[in-house]
Image: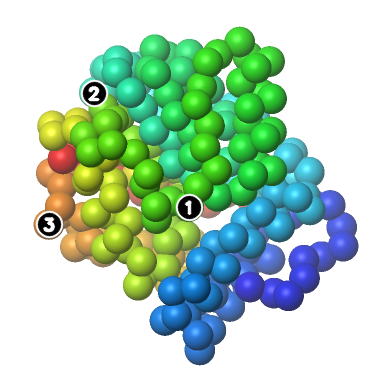
Amino acid sequence: MPSSWPTGQVCHWKELREAAAAIVCSPSETAARDRVSQYDKWEEIYKKYRSESLPWELGEPRPVLVELIKSQKVTPKGKALDICCGLGTNTIYLAQAGFETTGLDISKTAVARAKAKALQAGVDIRFLVSSALDFAFKTDEFDFIFDMGCFHHILPADRPRFIHGIRRVLKEGRHYFMVCFSDRNGSAWNHFSKGEILNIFSPHFDLMDMQHFSSLEGDGRIRFFYATLLRR
């Protein structure tokens, strides 16, 4: 992660790509405390940049999530977790759709903004400041877990812990909806092919659906993603 971010107030994917490369290439990456400190730098991003300048913040719920709920492949009942929820746009949608919703993010600034948005929207949501690796929830607590770009920022060494946490807190027979970067964006440690996604998740979940799609992101650029519906 660069030691300092640009002095301007617009956040670009270029800086984030460079930050991600710095994390993976760091000689101390294998030290747990150093990995944690790298994740903590998401707080620096949210403190430094305006909400509307963050490329992944669209100002509306992700269409792929809306389509999933409308398709009734996932019924909006019971408890939902929006992991790495950011400013809470998707979290609010899940609550409005009918879930009892929890939003989790490592950035206290992001969570504060998400709480304010939820209050304005008139929905009751439990927001927590925590790492996506901690999962301080009861076993089998959630009926649905939504992951918009969380998994693809988990370092390879931490993926087993992350997946174990997802499985532990998700009820048997319920769904984990994971959206991650596609390798069509170019070669990178966190850009995945269909085969790579299947190799990582198929030992732990049943594959229900997978789609490849493009999205016009908040910075006006088109990026490619895989949306994968998994069942425990």
Find disc 3 in the rendering and name its residue.
Answer: 203
- Residue sitting farthest toward the bottom: 27
Find disc 1 in the rendering and name its residue.
Answer: 131
Q: Mark 1 or 2, which is nearer the eye? A: 1
Which tag, 2 or 3, sits closer to the chain's start? 2
- Image coordinates of residue 21 in percent, x first then y, are 55, 75
- Image coordinates of residue 73 in percent, x first then y, are 24, 23
Which residue appears at 43% of the width and 24% of the height? 101
- Image coordinates of residue 111 in percent, x first then y, are 62, 37
Find disc 2 in the rendering and name its residue.
Answer: 73
Q: Mark 2 or 3, which is nearer the eye? A: 3
Q: Mark 1 or 3, which is nearer the eye? A: 1
Please state if 41 lies on the left or on the right of 94 as rendered. right
Say what secondary structure mark 1 lies in.
Answer: loop
- Which of 61/172 is in front? 172
Q: Relative to 24, is 27 above or below?
A: below
**Amino acid type indicated by mark 2:** Lys
**Amino acid type indicated by mark 1:** Ser
**Amino acid type indicated by mark 3:** Pro
- Which of 174/177 is in front? 174
